[in-house]
Amino acid sequence: MSLREELQFAELGYELLDQKRNILVIELLGLVDQAEEVQREADEALSEAHDALRGAAVSMGKLKTGRIAAAVNIEADIELSQRRVMGVRLPVVETSFTEHAPYYSTYRTTFRVDETVARFRDVLEIVGRLAELKVSIMRLAREVKKTIRKVNALEKIAIPELNETVKIIQERLEENERDMFVLMKMVKSRLEAKEQAQWQGQSDDSSSS
């Protein structure tokens, strides 16, 4: 690969990496905004779940509430998959629940028991989404950092050095062309002078005859 081709390849790599960096940054900022919103949702959901639990404890007493809580039989299934953004693998978390009801008698129980179960189930689902976002943010941030390093290396080191090398070689070639032109001109002048001298000599011989 010639220096010019290497320079063109480096410039193309810089453009592609710069585009990748911009796309990753846009995706990262979007996920940060989502994470902030989901974090607020998680805080609110957890607060509501604790309020419901306290309400159940006040209505039925802590002991009975604890026994009912121990009897709750809900299976949480977390399915992990992934998506890709510019080659970066990001997790996708899907949370589902399977209830094995009834797990307590409705006799002398308050509606707050059902409310508490539903609230904590919501919390688990939101936390799964929040974990997905936070892991995605960490992976994207790491890839953005790596891409920025590569972009800076091309922009501030590789491309300037290649440009300077190409410039030096071009100047040397132009200098050689000028030297060759001067040399050829000198050779031509000497050949013309020699021919002129030979022609003059022949003219003198003719005159003497």
Image (cartoon, grey):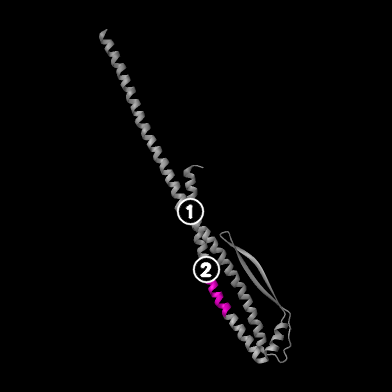
Q: Secondary structure at mark 2?
A: helix
* The magenta segment: 31-43
Question: Which residue position holds label 2?
Answer: 30
Between discs 2 and 1, the one toward the N terminus: 2
141 sits to left or right of 167: right
Picture residue at 65% right of the left edge, 84% below the top: 116
Q: Is residue 38 magenta?
A: yes
Picture residue at 62% right of the left edge, 78% below the top: 123
What mark, if any, has residue 181 been given in the picture?
A: none
- Please say if 51 is above or below 128: below
Q: Residues within 10 Å of mark 2 (few under 14, many from 20)?
A: few
- Amino acid type for the residue under numbered disc 2: Gly
Q: Nearer the viewer, residue 47 or 4?
A: 47
Q: Farthest residue toward the top?
A: 209
Percent across and percent down for residue 197 are 30, 18
Percent across and percent down for residue 112 are 65, 88
Q: Residues within 10 Å of mark 1 (few under 14, many from 20)?
A: some
Percent across and percent down for residue 169 are 42, 40
User: Residue 206's image quarter?
Assistant: top left
Report the Cα–Cα distance between label 2 and label 1. 27 Å
- Amino acid type for the residue under numbered disc 1: Ala
Picture residue at 60% right of the left edge, 80% below the top: 46
- Please say if 65 is above or below 148: below
Question: Which residue position holds label 1?
Answer: 153
Q: Farthest residue toward the front?
A: 63
Image quadrant occupied by the C terminus: top left
Q: Nearer the viewer, residue 141 or 96?
A: 141
- Pointers 2 and 1 in contact (CB under 8 A)? no
Picture residue at 43% right of the left edge, 49% below the top: 160
6 sits to left or right of 176: right
